[in-house]
Structures are given as C-alpha cells and as structure tokens.
Image: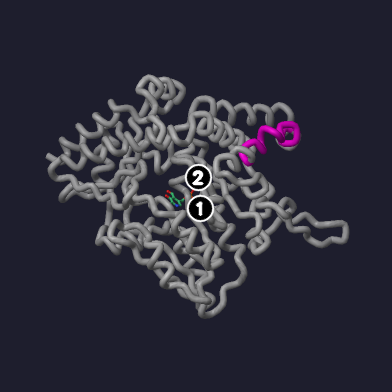
Amino acid sequence: MSAPLTPGAVQALRALTPGTQSTVHFNHAGASLPSAATLQAIHAHLKREAAQGPMEAGVAARDLTEAARVLAAQLLNAQVDEIALTGGNSSGWGAAFAALPAWRPGDRILVGRHEWGGNLAALRLNAERAGATLETIPSDASGCVDAQALESMLDGRVRLIVLTWLPANGGLINPAAEIGRVARRHGIPYFIDGAQAVGQFPIDVAQIGCDVLSGAGRKALRGPRGTGLLYVRRDFLEQLTPAFVDTHSAPLGPDGRPMLRKDAARLESAENSLALRCGLANALREALDLGLDTIRATIDANAQALRAELAAISGITVLDQGRERSGLVSFNLAGQDAGDVQRTLAAQGITIGSNGVPYTPLDMQARGLDRIARASVSYLTSSAEIDRLLEALRKLAG
Ligand SMILES: Cc1ncc(COP(=O)(O)O)c(C=O)c1O
C-alpha cells in the first residue's frame, strides 16, 4: 500500500479547494468539494459557449469535452469505447439495466443486501411486471455479500447478479472481485453500483469481472454534480438495447433505419452539459495525477483515525461492518435521532450526512436500524477537522 499524503501535501490541496475554507465537510460520500481548477474548467467552457455559440464551441472544443471519457477509461482500466458519460450514478446504472433483454416469468435476479434503494426500485418494478423474482444473497458474519452463498443459489434461471460495492450506510467494502469470479464462471451478467467506489481506490474492471459498473462524478472523484460515468464490457454491449434512443445513440442511416452505436455511448443521450464534462475531466485528471493508491491510503488513514476515536466515546456506537473499510464512517448516538445530530452539527458549521431506511432498505432492515449518522472523509480532510467533529460529538454525547 502507498503512503498517505503528508499533512503539508493535504494543506496544499486544501488551499486549491475553496470549500475547505468555508465549511468543515464530512459529507464527501454525498458530494465532495471540487478544486478551483475544476470550477475553472467548467467556467472556461461556459465562456467559450457564450463567445462562439454553444453548438460551435462544442465542436471546436471536442477534445476537451471528450477528455473525460479517455480519463475515465484510464481510471477503470477499460477501453474508451466501453465508457458512457452520464448525468450521475443512477442515470447510468438505470440506462444499462433498462437496456437488458426483456424479463420472463421465473427469471431470477440476485442482489446483495447493501443495494442502493434507487436500483432496488428499478429491479422491483421490472421483476414484478414480468413475474421475475428478486432474491437477496446472504451476507457472511462480517456483513459482506457472501460469494460462496451466491454460488449455491445459482441455477439456469438466474439472469443477473447485482452488487452495490460500497454501501451508502456504512464503511463496508464488498468483495466485488470474488463475486465477479462466480459470475464469470457461470456466465451470468454482473452489475456493480460503484457510486461510492469510483475515485476512492484503484479499480480494474477486467480484474473484477463485471459487465457493468456505474459511478458518480460528484463523490470521491470531486467532479461536478450532474456528472457520472458508466463502464460496459465491450462484449456485453451487444446485449443492451437502450430503452430510448436519439440522434446520438442511434442516428438514422441513408435508408432511414436507426444505426445503433457500437460503443457504450449507445447508452448516452444527445444533449449534455459539455461544461460539466470539462469539469469532470479535470477532476479525473487530478485523481489520476495524485494516484489512486495514495488517495486510498489517505482516506483509509483518516477514516481509521475517526472510527477509533468515535468508538472510544461513551454513548456513541460505530456501526460499520465488513473486513475492509471505506471512507464512510457510520454511527449513532444513544437516544438521539441521527437527523437531529446532523442538524445540530450543521448549526456549528460541520456537515455530516444521515440516512433512513429507503437508501439501503435490505441492510437497514436486516440490522434493525432505522437511521444512521454518517461522517465521510476525503483525502482533503485535515486532522484539525477530525478533532473539531470529535469535540462536537463528545459534547453531544454528553
Ligand atoms: C451506493 C450509491 N448508489 C447510488 C447512489 C445515487 O447516485 P446518483 O444520485 O448519482 O444517482 C448513491 C448516492 O449517494 C449511492 O451512495
């Protein structure tokens, strides 16, 4: 594992990130703080659009607006034609899911316990309509999705395996590659929701063995809101017929027939914010320049420090499960509602998140939780910020 960033390097990165001057941010899992250079990349394209005309600027700056695709491929160890640029995690995941062949009665979809609520909604709507079933893969004693249990559930009717890699309600990291080996061995399509994973540590889609992996731009990557990326394995792409197409994904040929694109952009739509794509490209470049190993080591050191201190406060229970942990630290204060804790801290200028059941219903219900507080760190998080959060929580815990 790489060494974490030094405090001096963190300070230098914070100086280039305006939000670190105005907020104590522990909601990087919701959305992180963009750098001044990312903001500048967005503004620069908006200015080009104003000066040249938006359509003309789009053509003239094509290399800049397409850079995000190239860099996203590099980030995931994918090919450029396997990347679609999306408006967020769900829009990418949902586009890929909606493009699968029609569900039939008796089809089985297997899903991990940590699945994102939005994906579950799409899965349930489609399964119910078709008479397919949605079944939860058991978790092991650590809370992780159990690859062996998955294998024992398989039969010829299983048509999809679905995993949220890093849940939204805790620091657990699911064994995505172990599950990928099972999926590959049995030739079953495998979707990963990587909303919390992309930008947090190195990802190699070939090694994981997934067919689809979605990510959000605004979280660990520190890109702008309204951006996302989607990987679709090249050989899997031909199984996907988009739920809707337009002039970009299926232009009409000379004979008037739609020509479905051969690359992952068949899951994109024609109209997008190219300014935000320029911002995303900058954020991707910053992450790659820093190095994903270094990012992971720094986030891990921050999260571990915060977790250990929190666990030592009487009246606070840390709720993270799993063998390996992410930068998301989940906890509850005895007798206090997590939403109230979030609001009290916000009044002191400290931002955390809190979740109810709907974001991760299967896991919350399995663990008898109805709300959790979550403090999520970045490599930008300073030890002074961690101290400030802990001090505020110590007072609250009484
Ligand atoms: C695991 C997970 N999946 C999906 C989402 C939704 O992402 P988006 O809002 O970009 O669609 C989130 C958002 O927090 C998430 O944590």
Q: Nearer the viewer, residue 82 or 218?
A: 82
Using residue 108 as the reference point, say whether residue 323 is left or right of it. Answer: left
Using residue 336 as the reference point, say whether residue 105 is left or right of it. Answer: right
* Disc 2 Cβ-to-ligand 1 distance below 8 Å: no
Where is residue 99 drawn, in percent x and y?
A: 61, 63
> Would you call the spot at circle 2 few (<14 residues within 10 Å), some (14-19), or many (20 or more)?
some
Looking at the image, the residue that sits furthest to the right is 254
Q: Looking at the image, which residue is at 24% across and 39% down? A: 344
Please check the rendered image and state whether residue 398 is part of the magenta-colored stretch, yes or no. no
Q: Looking at the image, which residue is at 30% across and 34% down? A: 350
Tell me, yes or no, whether the two marked residues, 1 and 2, touch with CB atoms within 8 Å: yes
Q: What is the three-letter code of the residue carrying label 2? A: Ile
Where is residue 207 drawn, in percent x and y?
A: 52, 50
- Helix, strand or loop for disc 2: loop
Q: What is the three-letter code of the residue carrying label 1? A: Ile
Q: Which residues are magenta?
A: 57-69
- Above or below, 355 relative to 141: above
- Above or below, 154 relative to 236: below
**Marks 1 and 2, how far apart at CA:** 8 Å
| Residue denoted by label 1 | 208
In this view of the protein, can residue 147 be seen by the observer?
yes
Q: Earlier in the sequence, mark 1 or mark 2?
A: 2
Which of the labelled discs sits on residue 106, or is there none? none
Considering the whole magenta stretch, tell me its main secondary structure.
helix
* Disc 1 Cβ-to-ligand 1 distance below 8 Å: no
Please check the rendered image and state whether residue 59 is part of the magenta-colored stretch, yes or no. yes
In this view of the protein, can residue 21 be seen by the observer?
no
| Residue denoted by label 2 | 203
